[in-house]
């Protein structure tokens, strides 16, 4: 598995943010029974940059906590069958890994939310990665049923890792 992490802000954390990202990504992929080695990019940025990205890619001119940029258009969440037909577009030509996409996290927003929810930054950071990973695998939360599914899966991943509120 290849996980590329870029800390644009050069911020320090009171936990190993690279190890936490790896653990959460692997946990979600295991839970979702991903049959491939995967590649994921994680970028840690600030409020202004994530607002710019949100405006550019979603036409929403405000800060957000996390953005997901999936590489594969899953017809149904975590339904990997279609990938065999689209191998040239979805798999890295040199490593053979499934290129899932990019996660961009506003560290400032994550800190604000951790404080507002009364839990550690590590928990909020892990939650945002789990949430974004589900998006990379085709999950969404546009209707209440989808929200419930994502919430259950996010909580299961974090509980399995012992990262609780």
Image (cartoon, helix red, strand yellow):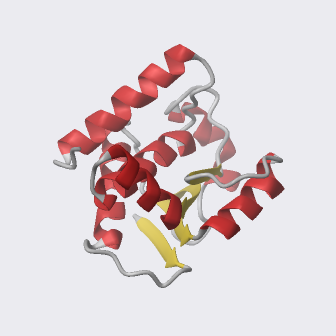
Foreground pick, 73 / 153: 153
Q: Name the quarter where the N terminus is drawn.
A: bottom left
Examine the rendering and report whether any part of residue 164 can be seen: yes
Instruction: Single out the residue that lies furthest toward the top.
Output: 145
Figure quadrant of residue 148: top left
As drawn, which residue projects farthest toward the left?
A: 162
**Count of residue discs:** 0
* Residue 49 picture location, percent across and down: 68, 69
Quick check: 53 left or right of 5?
Answer: right
Q: Is residue 87 left or right of residue 1?
A: right
- Quadrant in which the C terminus is drawn: top left
Compared with residue 163, is residue 94 higher up or lower down, i.e. above or below?
Answer: below
In this rendering, the answer to whether 16 lies above or below 150 is below
Q: Quadrant of residue 13?
A: bottom left
Q: Position of residue 3 (x, y in %)?
A: 44, 68
Relative side of 65 to 25, left or right: right
In this picture, is 126 found above or below 73?
Answer: below
């Amino acid at each position: 598995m290849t996980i590329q992490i870029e800390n644009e802000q050069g911020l320090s954390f009171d936990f190993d943010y690279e190890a936490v990202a790896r653990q959460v990504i692997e946990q979600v992929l295991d839970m979702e029974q991903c049959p491939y080695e995967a590649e994921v990019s994680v970028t840690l940025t600030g409020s202004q940059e994530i607002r710019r990205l949100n405006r550019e890619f979603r036409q929403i001119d405000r800060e957000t906590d996390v953005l997901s940029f999936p590489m594969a258009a899953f017809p149904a969440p975590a339904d990997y069958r279609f990938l065999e037909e689209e191998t040239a577009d979805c798999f890295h030509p040199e490593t053979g890994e499934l290129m899932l996409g990019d996660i961009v996290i506003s560290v400032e927003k994550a800190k604000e939310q951790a404080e507002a929810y009364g839990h550690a930054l590590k928990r909020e950071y892990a939650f945002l990665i789990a949430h974004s990973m589900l998006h990379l695998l085709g999950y969404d939360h546009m209707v209440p049923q989808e929200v419930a599914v994502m919430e259950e899966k996010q909580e299961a991943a974090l509980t399995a890792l012992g990262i609780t509120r």
